[in-house]
Amino acid sequence: MAQLTYHEQEDRKIYFRLRELLKELPDFCRTFFRGIEPQTQSRTRLAYAYDLTVFFNFLINENPAYRSFSPSDFKLDVLDKLTSQDIEEYMEYLKYRPDAGTDNEIVNKEGGIKRKISSLKSFYNYFYSAGLIETNPAAKVRLPKINEKEIIRLEYDEVAKLLDEADSGDKLSKKQQDFHKKTRKRDLALLSLLLGTGMRISECVGIDINDIDLEETAVNIHRKGGKEETVYFSDEVARALKDYYEERRTIMAEAGSEEAFFLSLQNKRLSVRSAENLVKKYAQIAAPLKHITPHKLRSTYGTNLYRETGDIYLVADVLGHSDVNTTKKHYAAIDENKRRSARKAVKLREV
């Protein structure tokens, strides 16, 4: 059997996790997941499975009509028996719900609630469109309004501080400095790549050695959904990558990580979680009052590219957004600033 690539391994993990979750859901849910498979990504289906598990647990624990049920007791006609009021009660429940097996509560804000209700709407729409149920009460339920949050990003001077700290490590703790001696080139290369291309952290850690072409200043990455795409980077990023590339060639990686570009101290492919912690470590020094994540570095790149080019379609393409409206939503504040500055652009009379 041929060795699976990193991306195939990740997809395989999702596949088996989804299979396990389906055992906790009513049997008719399998029809839904088979039906949507050709049009959806594996991560999307996994998210649906998590959300539907929460929904059926709600019915069992909170709805008196189903309190004695187990998941296998539910039949498809339950979807016709539920009303829009039942789903609105579910929406209310989602704000604060018990964390199974603990005394804690799980708090969902508007975004989390909207996603779970959207999942339920898709679930109902599938069976209703297929003519397998007669009613669609989920269609009558309005999604919660999302309060737009200010986009958090790094300013130019903060980007410089972040990279300077990754290069020098001067302000790290003594213990962190000991690690920094071994990871300086890797850390600087990874941060430069994120800030210089806007790629997602999962795309970054998934890069293999052969994906990088330093002469063409380009790297092949796997976007969400498995699409392979070439991303270009600046000479500044190329220098950081070249320094680490030369070091990486001397490292004997562990089995299964031989092709990985970014390695952990254990010589295994760097995980998403480890890369997130790496970003957090340096960001706390460069911008201590901001909660900076890898996604915020992506926003930083998108903002800078839009400021320089003014081309929202180019930004959407480079960031891998399938819908330019997603990009517009994130960078609307910059457009507002441009509109404000326009008031001084046209003079009516010389003063």
Image (cartoon, rainbow, N blue to C red):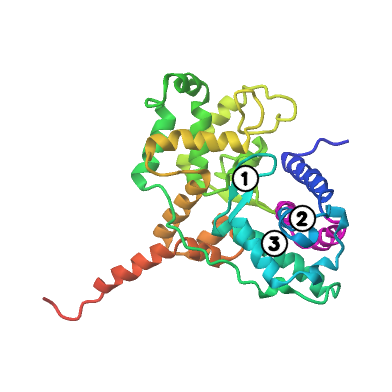
Apparent side of residue 172 relative to residue 119 in the rendered image (left or right)? left
Q: Which amino acid is tagged 3?
A: Ser
- Label ID, residue 203: 1
- Give coordinates of residue 100: x percent, y percent: 69, 43
**Which of the two discs, 3 and 2, sits closer to the camera?**
2
Which of 343/152 is in front?
152
Q: In which quarter of the image is residue 66?
A: bottom right
Upstream in sequence: badge 3 or badge 1: 3
Q: Which amino acid is tagged 2?
A: Ile
Q: Name the residue under label 2.
A: 60
Secondary structure found at label 2: helix
Which of 37/113 is in front?
113
Which of 248/154 is in front?
154
- Name the image quarter holding the N terminus: top right
Q: How far apart are marks 3 and 1 (CA)?
A: 25 Å
The answer to whether residue 240 is seen in the rendering is no
Q: In which quarter of the image is residue 121?
A: bottom right
Which of 348/127 is in front?
127
- Residue at point 52% right, 42% down? 193
Q: Distance between the residues labelled 3 and 2?
A: 19 Å
Secondary structure found at label 1: helix
- Label ID, residue 46: none
Q: Residue furthest bottom?
A: 348
Please state the extent of the stretch shown in magenta in the rendering. 26-53
**Which of the two discs, 2 and 1, sits closer to the camera?**
2
Q: Name the residue under label 3.
A: 119
Q: Residue furthest left?
A: 351
Q: Which amino acid is tagged 1?
A: Glu
